[in-house]
Image (cartoon, coloured by chain):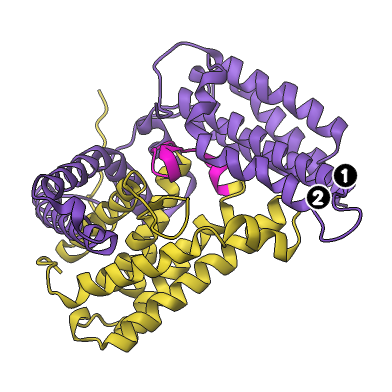
Amino acid sequence: MSTRTESVDLVGDEAATNLARAALFAALVGAFAYVTFPNPVSPVSVTLQVLGVFLAGVYLGPAWGPAALLLYLAAGALGAPVFEGGSAGVGALLGESAGYLWSYPLAAGVVGAVVHRGTALRDPSAAGLGTLVAAMVLGTVVIYALGVAGLALVLSLGPVEAVAVGAVAFLPAEALKIAAAVGIVRSDAITAA
Amino acid sequence: MTLAYVPGDSLAHRLDPRTKLLVQIGFAAAAYAHATPRGLAALTALAGGCLWAADGDIADLWAYRVAFPVLFLAPLVAGATLGSPWFRAARAAETALASYRVLLLLVVAAAYVRSTPVRDSRAALQRTVPGRAGTFLGAGVALVFRFLPLLRRDLLTAREAVRARGGDRLPVRERIRLVAVAGTNRAFGRADRLGTALAARCFAWNPTLPRLSFEPADYPALALGVGLLAVAAAAVI
């Protein structure tokens, strides 16, 4: 009988915790896809995925935030029901929602970089109101720019048509999410960060 | 109803996950390169075949219902113009073909999700992406599958608690904040306990994965995937 020995290359404590946080945040963004709120100014109801993207950037920073969102995309592509309405599969990453989904890691990176001013993490509740709002407005711009561009490319629409289909009904709700996210960060309610 | 793995013994269940991923990529490339009525007719037959090979049926597509309004609306918006002739059929037809192409991609993706267990998907990912990036993706994806139901329940509990305390009368922004705070705190709590547990159990960069191997049935499917990529490349060059 032959035996085989291999040395085990252990993951360090800090990396293990960061990986766990990234994975849990990816699952949280997926769980947010199931939470819908009525939208006071538009007939399309609000889901909280984009709020999850903002919070990933704020609490995990410009490196682990995008990593968490990449895990979200990979898990969705391989069948975890984490995309809008509990859908899954590679089709979502190549179809009409492709631009929005691929923009999430980038947006989390942008939000993280603005809030933390570089790669070293600092206490997000210490960031000023202006910084937080600017970070999330910038994140929203990234998401909708790529989302609308993706829509135009995938469905062969013109720019104005793509904005009409993919942004007009959804944009007002983003203000709500930015307001909620700023409230969360400034209230010190997140204990484990 | 959500789309999920259904245990079975169909042709697609027996294929290696890497083969199925290659077929999906080939299919997408072909669908983008040949968005003509003839090309899409051929791909419709192929997509139907994929779903049939995975023992799926048309009801599996219900999971994608949120995509339908956009796919249906896009041709109408593309065709509409301000002023005479008000509706350009040619533009609408072009976008309708593009919409239909997206629907076909969703059909093929549904066949993959139905026929592939999480363990196999993870192993395929980790064997395809080399090094620590592969381990990170593989372990992370497995954890997302594991924790998604728990976090969904956490959020549901938080919503019910808010409602029970008369939270329905609060402004929407405040309700979103309360639910998100509860969800994020639970996620961080679970992550920190999980991180400690992973370190305590010698979580390694080189874990033992389930064995994956290409069987005889994989070779025709691999050839199909490569063929689709070739068809797409031929149209581009």
- On residue B89, which mark appears? 1
A20 shown above or below B112: below
Q: Position of residue A126 (x, y in %)?
A: 19, 86
Query: How far, Cα to Cα, is label 2 from label 1?
Result: 6 Å
Which circle marks residue B79 in the picture? 2
Q: Secondary structure at mark 2?
A: helix
Q: Is residue A84 magenta?
A: yes
Image x and y of residue B90, in percent? 89, 46
Quarter of the rendering containing residue B40:
top right
Left or right: residue A14 versus residue B65 is left
Badge 2 sits on which subunit? B
Q: Looking at the colours in the rendered structure, which chain would you say is drawn in purple?
A: B
Discs 2, 1 touching: Cβ within 8 Å: yes
Spot the yellow chain and give its letter: A
Can residue A27 be seen by looking at this rendering? Answer: yes
Name the one closer to the observer, B95 or A154: B95
Q: Residue furthest top?
A: B9
